[in-house]
Amino acid sequence: MSEMTEAPRVAAAPRLPGWAKPLAFALLPVLAALLAGALVLWALGSDPLNYYTYVVERGLLRTRGLQASIVHMIPLLILGTALIVSFRAGLWNLGIDGQYILGTLTAGVVAPKLVAVMPVVPALFLAMLAGAAVGALWALPPALLRAKHGINEVISGLMMSFMATSLAAAIIKLWAKDPASLEPQTSTIPVEQRLPLLPGTDINLGIVIALVVTIAAHLAISRTSAGLKLRILGLNPAAATHAGLPAPRMIVLVLCLSGAIGGFAGAVELTGVLGKMQASWNPAYGFAVVPLVFLARMNGWAMIAFVFAFSVLSIGGASAAVRLGVPQSFTMVLVGFLLLFLALAEWIDQTRREQA
Amino acid sequence: MTYETEIRADPATGPAQPLVALEGVTKRFPGVVANDAVTLEFHPGEVHALLGENGAGKSTLISMLAGVQQPDEGRILIEGVPTKITSPKHALSLGIGTVYQHRMLVPTLTVAENLQMGAPWYRRPDRAAIREKFAESCRAFGIDIDIDRVVGELSLGEQQQVEIIRALWRGGKLLVLDEPTAMLSPAGVRELGRMMGRMRDAGVSIIFITHHLSEAVEFGNRVSVLRSGRVAGAMSADEVAALTPEATRARIVDLMFGAGVEGDTKIERRARRDHGERAFEVVGLSGKSQKGDTGFSDVTFHVQEGEIFGVAGVDGNGQTPLAEAIAGQIPCQGDVLLEGRALGRADVAKRYRLGLRYATDDRLGEGTVASLPISLNMVLKQIGRPPYWRGGVQRDALIDAHAESLFEEFDVRAPSIHTPIGKLSGGNIQKVLLARELSGAAKVVVYNKPTHGLDLKNIETTRRRIRDGADNGIATVLISTDLEEILSLSDRIGVMVRGRMVGVVPNGPDARKRVGAMMAGESEE
């Protein structure tokens, strides 16, 4: 009886190769997001197809666009790494933007002075270390509050970010202003004393640094004992204590390391692209990267891919904003849709598996 | 509804028909029989004290009365009518109100606001009526709580009184109190006792769950003892009324621990043997759990090579923090000596390396990391140590080989050593845990409730492991709330009550009585 009812159902199910399902679950949400984005564009009165082709052409296909996209990746990759380090340990360093800004400021203050007295390479290296140190320092109060008193690091981190933006502006206006400039900004590093460009391109060495940092962090998290300890802290803090890991100390270390990488991102951006820190500089990269890190499921390799796609969208979207009048923040609309549809796909997958 | 209108049990004619009766109720979960043919009666105007350890099946029993779960076999009769209690709402409509162990009030709202909740969203709560009703209940049960106070500011006892009143309003006939004294001060317990007395006199039937014998004797009109899902014994209302408190107490001790409950003959004790050197010593150890506020103080005992030292006691009397302190997980005062050497402040990893192992009872909560593969969970306490890590880099081949051999030796049933451990059954998780703690140079192993929550087959396997380990010279500390287990495995037995080790007795024919008496709160002297 049961065999008779079973048989046709099995026959009716199409036989798919093993890789087909994961691929479908990765691609369908992307298509859905593009489609939903197209609807929004259409509602705004723009031609979606026109917009998408324009974005791809300007951000990816043209050499200059591609180079701009790659340069745009540099801070995002390093900040993404900072977030992955903390997220994997179950800690939410959302004070990342403050650490980035103070890292940028530190490098902006220190680098022009250093390049004046020593060769470029060690000077910029020291400036980056200084930026990382300040980033770590800025992450310390939330880290200590979390480790000693269990105070949520998200709230205190966000507070520290607000203070960082104001503090950076105050420092520039009061003490670190370049006397030669009318704008409140630090002294500018001469173009030839910034991070060297890769031969034949406009892409600076920062991309190499960013990729090395990202991949090194990924390997460290997945292949070393320190990385395993960090993951255990994130996956099951009680098991961490049971296995004898010093949880409070690790919380401080991880959050400060994340802060250091955040500050480092700012310093790399300053020594490679910006050349100076302006009092109003607050790109909020951190919050653009958070959804990308989640899309990548905190995996370094996947994060590189998502950051690249996002950069192409941003650079292409910036051109499209000028040319087609679609606001540049439309890029974030697409990212939002993508996040939504990926979560939906995950949910469908899970409920189906539970029913099976 | 006022309580005066409730039907009272007429003491002259005796309780005729029980308000609620369980008839041969059985509830199974995968691998466990939580309730096994339980038959109980609950009469109006009676406090029915239900004694039993954690895991004795009390929670399952309550959840069936509260409509959260349905029995697999047997039936529940309400006023004589067989009834299927399909949902918590249905239970309330049948007159069954439950007060759970964990507080269910919103701490940031006032008492009045808490009492208003639960009505349909479209209906405006009748505040004046609620006030009046609350005042009436306060008068009826002799309590004094300001209805406008924020719940979080009330004492735990007062919060509980509010919950009891709310449960009575919603249910009204049968009130289930799940370990209501667990978090109360002695004064709070006395007050609760008075309140129960008044409710009983008003005709309410009360199920009073506790694992304190003295409370059962003091407050219960009728006493039943649950053990391993079965009713191990019961005293009817007449019986309780006829006996003096001392006699009642003695009778309950008999029911809980005495021979004849399951037959002492069933227990096959470990054969006497000569043990080796004193391998392990705990001297004047005191400490406190970081999770809750249970602690232990001034605990001293020793274990010899090849000996099994049982630690008996009702759950929550300081056994777990004691084990955690021995393992190095929590700070403590006093000394832990391994082969005569004080361990001082050595951390978990160091103690593990020296051969002092701790098999935790919280197997998924802290013992393992669910999403990590079995192989990594096998070396969880050796992270970063050679040979499995060199220069901080993980050496998969060695970790896998290690896991593979333990996998075989401990007969773990899983698709592969790379399966996330969270996908395994409880029995197999326990095997991995034991493999980790028994592998290498294990000298002293502390087991915390090693068979808790396992099915029969795995219980047997685990006990054999413990025995074999001891036979091979491991000094063993066996913490268990299952007295049968302690009696069948241990050479000597220590009893913990309220964080203190109140006595140590050698295992033997009279051990059950002596241990039982100590667990029930009578000191050995």
Image (tube, coloured by chain):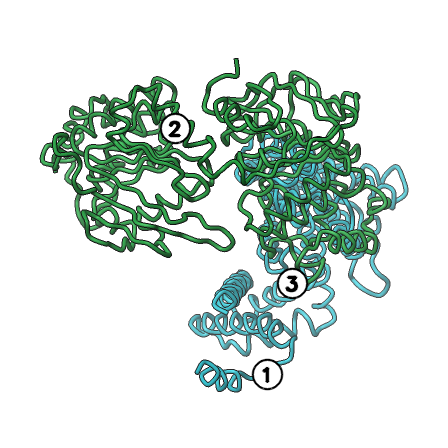
* Residue A111 picture quarter: top right
Kind of residue indicated by mark 1: Arg
> Which residue appears at 45% of the width and 73% of the height?
A39
Residue in the picture at 23% in, 25% down: B197
**Mark in front: 3 vs 1:** 1
The residue singled out by tag 2 in the image is B252
> SS class of the residue under badge 2?
helix
Residue B145 as seen in the image, left or right of residue B107: left
Left or right of residue B369, residue B497 in this image: left
Tag 1 residue: A15
The location of residue A119, given as percent across then percent down, is: 90, 43
Q: Which chain is green?
A: B
Along the line of sight, which residue is nearer the eye, B184 or B271?
Answer: B271
Q: Nearer the viewer, mark 2 or mark 3?
A: 2
- Left or right position of B63 against B283: left
Q: Nearer the viewer, residue A131 or B217?
A: B217
Spatial CA distance of label 2 from label 1 is 65 Å
Q: Which residue is mark 3?
A: A306
Q: Chain of mark 3?
A: A
